[in-house]
Image (spheres, helix red, strand yellow):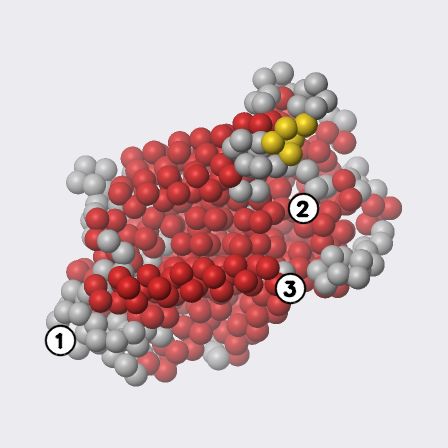
Amino acid sequence: MKFTGAASRKLLSDIMAPASHVASLPKVLGPISIVFMGIGAIIGAGIFVLTGTAAALYAGPAVVLSFVLAGIACAFVALCYAELAALMPVSGSTYTYTYVSLGQLAAWLVGWNLILEYSIGAAAVAVGWSGYFNGTLASVGLAIPPRLSTSTGQVVQLADGTTATAIANLPAAAIVALLTLLLVRGTRESARINNLMVAIKLVVILAFIGFGISHVSVANWKPFVPANTGTFGTFGWSGVLHGASVVFFTYIGFDAVSNCAQEARRPQRDMPIGILGALVISTVLYILVAGVLVGVVPYPELNVAAPVGLAANRLGIGWFAALIQLGALIGITTAILVLLYGQCRIFATMANDGLMPPVFSRIHPRLETPWMSQILIGVIVAAIAAVAPIETLSELVGVGTLFSFLMVCASVVRLRHLEPHALRPFRVPAVPLVPLLGILSCLGLMAGLAPLTWARLVVWIAIGLIIYFAYGRSRAVHRLTGRSQSNE
């Protein structure tokens, strides 16, 4: 049955019907795996790369406050995610929640922004991975030529002291390709490898905090909030806000982990544990690492590819610096893995609804994964990671993430009105206050982004609207009968 209008929405009963979502995804994930999936996505390039970038370019030592602001905003949003993921334990994340609460057009716009959020996010993290990978190879005399390990068009310095223009970041593209193949092979295998890598990452991060605290120089924290340069978002309190907006993209792990719902064994219990557990652990670690980092290395020196590695070298413990490099590589790898996983599930769900070509919702008969969408996403992300710098990518992801989070908060309020009697295994307290605070927090952080980032978002949305009205709207299907549409 075709939808008659962009305002048409799905009902909860429709969403929960087997025919309404991507079928044949095995239930293989428990609460620990879901927490680790969240930590795997959240703690990646943000903690190992963007902490230094945000401190050096925007907030100075007050990058600690940037993470506090981002964490507070995330607390409101995570509660909303927990309610919706337990209420609708299916693939699709924010896209699905918006389809039920706000209708088809709003769902398409969210899904379209999620493509930007996940694809660009995975590419940004892959660029961060490349920086640490090259540093690790350089430490043993096997560095990749800078022209082949730097974003296209950037000026790099060669070994003989001359400069040249970079061709592409091949290591970034290679890690995306490798993880795409792993995800095509199966969710259970990917989750096991992710759990192991997250455990190693947590040990390394805790070791950095433990060793680094004794080497912190309080002088490096002064001034804690450097004076604004005269440009909005460059130091001062506007810089703290700008820094929070940039590092916020690392929290897209909440959206990624909500995609685990259809493959969770007991989603009504496991999803709130996974989402909220990942938030608490990740935010605390971000704040501690940021404080140690700017205490060990003066913040102007942190705009490098591997700031945590630089801090480890300053500690003067050779073996520990090598351990940090290895831990960062492993940690960033898990973030790429989970982002690629989440993007694929959303893409497959949109294809199942007819908003994308149906080939991308097909499940491999033996591997039980949406392999076509996974391969397509891997190719696109690898190409972006090869050519674009991390600074541009992170700001694009930040605005897409905030837009999606805002819609999640709005969906909770709307669904409380539209489906008041639905069984909610987890309930957001103090509705509508908590979702409203989440919306205001997201708007505040969006205000801290550069005008050019907003312009790029407007262009992206315009492209999405053209595709929706030219293709998706006429092909969107609902596979259920009866009361399958609503314009409430």
Location of residue 300 by image quarter: top right
Circle 2 sits in a helix, a strand or a loop, which is it? helix
First in sequence: mark 3 or mark 2?
Answer: 2
Residue type indicated by callout 1: Gly
* Disc 2 packing (10 Å; few <14; some 14–19; many ≥20): many
Which disc, if any, is residue 53? 2
First in sequence: mark 1 or mark 2?
Answer: 2
Q: How far apart, in angstroms, are the residues tagged by discs 3 and 1?
A: 46 Å
* Disc 3 packing (10 Å; few <14; some 14–19; many ≥20): many
Residue bearing the label numbered 3: 448
Residue bearing the label numbered 1: 482
Q: Residue at x 73, y 47 (%)?
A: 56
Location of residue 476 by image quarter: bottom left
In the image, residue 176 lies at what x, y percent?
43, 36
Circle 3 sits in a helix, a strand or a loop, which is it? loop
On the rendered image, what quadrant is the C terminus found in? bottom left
Q: Residue at x 63, y 60 (%)?
A: 450
User: Which sits in the foreground, 82 or 335?
Assistant: 335
Can you say whether 459 is above or below 162 in the image? below
In the image, residue 47 lies at what x, y percent?
61, 45
Location of residue 390 by image quarter: top right
Q: Are marks 3 and 1 in contact (CB under 8 Å)?
A: no
Q: Are marks 1 and 2 in contact (CB under 8 Å)?
A: no
Q: Which mark is nearer the camera, 3 or 1? A: 3
In the image, residue 108 lies at what x, y percent?
34, 65
On the rendered image, what quadrant is the N terminus found in? bottom left
Whether residue 388 is visible here, answered yes or no, is yes
